[in-house]
Amino acid sequence: MRVNQHHVLTTRKVLLLPYSAHHVPTYHTWMQDPELQSATASEPLTLDEEYAMQVSWREDADKLTFIVCLPLADPIPRQAAVQVGVHDSPERMVGDINLFLSQPADDDEDDDEDCVHGSFVGEIEVMIARKDLHRQGYGRAALLIFMGYIIFHWPTICLEYETSLQQAVVPQPEDPPNQEEEGLSGDEATGSARNACALPASTAKNSRLSLRYLRVKIHQSNIASIKLFESVGYKRTRAGKANYFGEVELRWQDDGGFLRRLKELLWMEGDEWEADTMSFH
């Protein structure tokens, strides 16, 4: 997604920055670890493939990702900028956190039928890659601030994703129609070609579709990760059983008070999920 490409989230516990090309070498090194590959159900990629994947994360409208870094030693004034290669240098990188958007499945037994349509589902993944920083609160802090970002920016996130879905079904003509054959004047033909590639007029009006829920799928043996998500309010689905891959699913729905409770945490530095107040260059 492009929605966060200039956004930075900073708290006293963690710093989140958009996944960028200069992060790739460190990320690639992390993902050579067989344990991380197993924990994330990932296949090892070449460095070139990793760069291509980073571009996909930036451009695909169904994916949103941040790199998790150590917190800043000193607060940065809002008019200042986080510096590339300094505040997110390899030794300060901790892991990453991701959101995948999709439409609810019609056969989801945990969904009310009336709520399946007109809503989206977000799946979260969080990885603290550095083993020396496990169990120090970085994963929980990153998860909370990321969830706050999703809730606060949901109209924009939803619009980017919904627009991509609409563009996928809008037919794109291979060649401009012959104006004389179609019987159109020059102005009419220009307008028709332009409208063929335009977004539907209802895009902005209908872009505030609901976030049905956030979910996470965790291998049943990863007790620490299950407890992490349960600690912030995720609950197991009614099925309660592991799937074919040994994963259990947990879900979370905003009750309308999440941002207020997040703001009250002592390690927050204000409404930092309003990330447009910070710049990144």
Image (cartoon, rainbow, N blue to C red):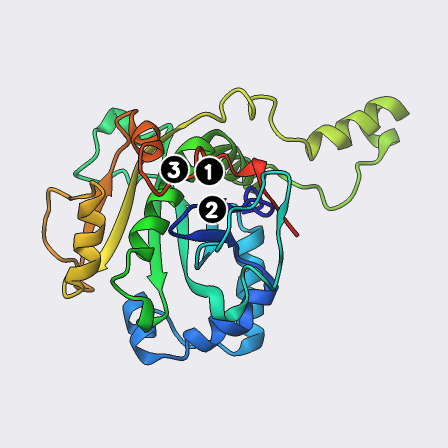
Q: Which kind of residue does numbered mark 1 sit on?
A: Glu
Decide: few, some or many residues near mark 1? Use Cα within 10 Å; few <14, some 14-19, many ≥20: some
Query: Where is residue 42 shown, x and y percent of the image?
Result: 36, 70
Label 2 to label 1, Cα distance in Å?
Answer: 6 Å
Say which mark, if any, is on residue 10.
2
Which residue does the numbered mark 1 point to in the structure image?
272
Verify CB contact (< 8 Å) between mark 2 and mark 1.
yes
Query: Where is residue 56 shown, x and y percent of the image?
Result: 55, 58
Tell me the SS state at disc 3: helix
**Residue 29 sits above or below residue 175 on the image:** below
Considering every residue shown, the one lying at the far front of the view is: 74
Which residue does the numbered mark 3 point to in the structure image?
148
**Residue 73 sits above or below residue 104 on the image:** below
**Residue 49 sits above or below residue 210 on the image:** below
Label 1 to label 3, Cα distance in Å?
Answer: 9 Å
Please give left or right for residue 122 compared with residue 193 in the image: left
Query: Where is residue 164 shown, x and y percent of the image?
Result: 55, 40
The residue at 89%/26% (across/down) is 186
Give the mark, 2 or 1, whose residue is nearer the N terminus: 2
Label 3 to label 2, Cα distance in Å?
Answer: 12 Å
Disc nearest the viewer among 3 and 2: 2
Query: Where is residue 54 shown, x and y percent of the image?
Result: 55, 62
Q: Which kind of residue does numbered mark 3 sit on?
A: Gly
Say which mark, if any, is on residue 210.
none
Please give left or right for residue 30 compared with residue 173 in the image: left
Tell me the SS state at disc 2: strand
Tell me the SS state at disc 1: loop
